[in-house]
Image: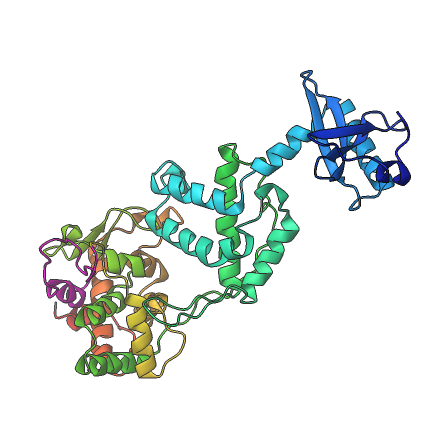
Amino acid sequence: MIKLTKTVIDALETPATGQAFLWDADVRNFGVRVSSGGVKTFVIRYRNTDGRSRRLSIGRYGTLTIDQARTQARIKLGSVAAGGDPAEERQQRRKAPTVSEICDWYLGEAEAGRLLGRRNRPIKKSTLYMDRSRIERHIKPLLGSRKVASLDTGEIARFQSDVAAGKTSKTRRSGRGRNSSGGAGAASRSVTTLSAVFGHAKRMSLIKDNPATGVRKLASNPRERRLSTAEIVKFGQAMRDLAEIGEAQKGLDLVRLLALTGFRLNEGQGVRRPWVDTDQRVVAFPDTKSGGQRRAIGRAAMEVIARQAAGADSDFVFPADLSESHFKQGPDVILRIVKRAQLEDVTAHTLRHTFGSVAGDLGFSELTIKGMLGHGKRGVTQGYIHIDEGLRLAIECTANKIADLLDGKCASVTPLASLKEAYESIGA
């Protein structure tokens, strides 16, 4: 053996077949390999703790200098002396899953009900729907090809900043659906989804660490937008205008139901006929964001449900036109209404917030309003709110007032002076 130098390596002859090795006299088990194609590569050889003989390429001659390669060889051979196996570690890194692979695993396992979410129950379909949207719109475009093991908190934080800055925003040129945009809220929720996906993968030993742990999420502005009474009137007029020029009545009825009940978008779009008790005026949701609930609705809202034609092959109140699922174009209908009414920043959540706000304007308590909206129970006292007479009264009064505003029958909301006035307002 002789010490490897540039002169020595340059003088190496190319073998006719296979490969030839020349080992360094300075660093034991460090050498250079020459292939039949004339490629010269720095390598090390060693035995791992199991006694297996291993060989590991460090880099090509020319890309690395001899001194650089010798330094790397000392580091890797030092790792071997400490019980490591650089070749095995490199192989494992190559096999390590990418972010896209882990996300696809998560979606498949969650759809099959094999992953548990809040309260140790299978992840809700509504949660999975939003997770899929964030994965496809934000996570995969920016991080999909990256190995999870190569990520750190700094890169996750930069991902959040990129989403917030609109780097993944996309405008749809044709077809159904809405534009994909960024912002602090989308960025923060995408990090939440990413952290949850990694958390499940870590628990199942698919990855060693969760690189999203410890990332500080951007604060988003709370959604406090509500429609004023004047805006509710304009919203209702716009609905009538669109009906006259051909807007599908099913979509308009869905939006009216949301306004008259305070239902969440997925609750209103996905309501099924077997859940509706017309006599008690109750919708029994088997599952919501806060678990299974029985939610009372007013007569005006029940009228909307009752006038929907029953489908022969679907028990959805608002069935989809082209599939076996339910109607999913509620947000698009709302956008057209908002445009017609010349309003801004109005979503299905705005209608939900408006329902609660009108109830507050009428004089109903915050505790009652939480019960009306089906909010999760946050304290012992709230646990006593069921569908009692007082809650039904509040729902009926609120639905009637919003219906009158939408229909242009009144233009203001004044607090109810007493229970007697409340009952008189609903004709009871």
Residue 146 picture location, percent across and down: 57, 48
> Which of 16/263 is in front?
16
Q: Where, quadrant-wise, is the C terminus in this rendering?
A: bottom left
Quarter of the image that includes the N terminus: top right
* Magenta segment, prevailing SS (helix, strand or loop): loop
> In which quadrant of the rendered view does residue 308 lie?
bottom left
Count of marks placed on residues = 0
- Is residue 82 covered in magenta? no
Whether residue 230 is visible to the viewer of this picture, yes or no, is: no
* Residue 363 picture quarter: bottom left
Residue at position x 24%, y 83% from top?
237
Span highlighted in magenta in the image: 297-323
Membership of 309 in magenta stretch: yes
- Residue 366, x across and y down, in percent: 36, 61
Q: Position of residue 57 (x, y in %)?
A: 72, 34
**Is residue 376 depicted above or below 18 in this figure?**
below
Q: Is residue 408 above or below residue 22?
A: below
Residue positioned most to the top: 51
**Residue at the (18%, 64%) spot, across then down:** 298
In this view of the protein, can residue 171 be seen by the observer? yes
Q: Nearer the viewer, residue 33 or 311?
A: 33
Q: Residue at x 18, y 65 (%)?
A: 301
Task: State left or right for residue 410 relative to residue 69.
Answer: left
Question: Which quadrant of the structure image shows residue 244?
Answer: bottom left
Taking the spot 18% from the left edge, 68% from the top edge, the residue there is 250
Above or below — where is 182 with respect to 146? below
Question: In the image, is 277 to the left or to the right of 111?
Answer: left
Q: Is residue 279 left or right of residue 330?
A: left
Q: Which color scheme did the rendering employ for the protein?
A: rainbow
